[in-house]
Image (spheres, rainbow, N blue to C red):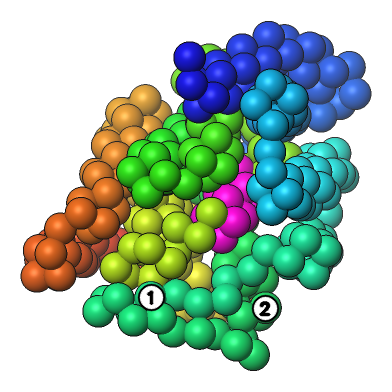
Amino acid sequence: MSLYFWAFAVALLVSLFVMPAVILLAEKTGAMDAPNARKVHKKPIPRIGGLGIYAGFMAAIIFVALKFGLDGEQFRETVGLLVSGSIIVGIGLVDDYKNLPAKLKLLGQIFAAMVLVFGFGVRIDFVTDPFGDYIYLEQIAIPATLFWLVGLTNTVNLIDGLDGLAAGVAAIASVTILLIALEQNFVLVAVLTAALAGAAVGFLRYNFHPAKIFMGDTGSMFLGFMIAGISVTGAVKSVVAIALVVPIFALGLPILDTTFAIVRRLRGGVPIFKPDKGHLHHRLLNVGFTQRQAVLLMYVISALLGLSAIALTAVSYQTAALILFIVVVAIVYGVKKLGIARPANN
């Protein structure tokens, strides 16, 4: 059996089996998510499920490293991801217990990103344009990488509003990048995304509606940060025709939701970090979808975006342009139909 299978299977099994212990820990230590006017659940739910995702991912990567080995550069990049990812988990865990101020949490995310960039040399040095030419980032390489890492960390964090939503979208995004990594023979990227997908799928056993546990910021920030870091580490950006289009499409749903949340809050004259009930999942619930229906629809959208990303790496530039046009038209139609760019009623 391949190392990709082992990575997925170990992460899945560990995530599955540690989750009851995580639920018990949350109940004993008071890590409970209380309902309020903005949230859709009606009773307190344990909210440090990200620990189970983290445990599954870490166990899988350590197992693969011991069983199959990693060469010098792969080892350095992997250790960098594990160290910086552990910092993100620590910040998320503190936030799940203490509700850190948004600015302090952001500073913590930047610190974790800086550890990966400065401590382990993982950064975006160049991208490609639609014609296959290299664009070297030079002086903006480090700021661009930090923005990328912190930005994707928060996109997954902000979409975590319905049972099973963030974990499912992250799993679909991970599988998308995994498939492209296999096509391009990026072994390390494939192993890391297989482990991340396995950990997220294992968590879904306890998180799909009605959820027994939430991932909390511990899990949502970890998933976003790891997808961002893995996409930089594997240099997926350097071989596709359109810059960073693969991870952008793979996480297209949370990226769009975050973008329109910022637009919506600016238009409404409220701070961009202030939570509201204008996210896509809120809009779907308002028009009559159940939680499960809304989540499954968003899974389908994420899967279609993932398939579009895969298609973009294997078709001509003309076909790629047509795919992008269709996606943009669909997005514009959906935004107008659901009104997710309009100020929300909190």
Residue with the mark numbered 1: 128
Residue 110's x, y, as percent? Answer: 76, 67
| Crowd band around label 2 with a 10 angstrom C-alpha radius: few (<14), some (14–19), many (20+) | some
**Amino acid type, mark 1:** Thr
Earlier in the chain: of badge 1 and badge 2, it is 1
Q: Which residue reaches farthest right? A: 29
Name which residue lies at 37% across and 25% down.
Answer: 292
| Crowd band around label 1 with a 10 angstrom C-alpha radius: few (<14), some (14–19), many (20+) | some
Q: Is residue 80 visible?
A: yes
Name which residue lies at 38% across and 71% down.
Answer: 243
Q: CA distance from mark 1 to mark 2?
A: 17 Å
Mark 1 touches mark 2? (CB < 8 Å): no
Residue 95's x, y, as percent? Answer: 81, 46
**Amino acid type, mark 2:** Ile
Q: Magenta segment, which residues?
A: 223-233
**Which structural element holds mark 1?**
strand
Residue 331's x, y, as percent? Answer: 23, 61
Q: Which residue reaches farthest bottom? A: 139
Location of residue 62 by image quarter: top right
Residue 98 magenta:
no
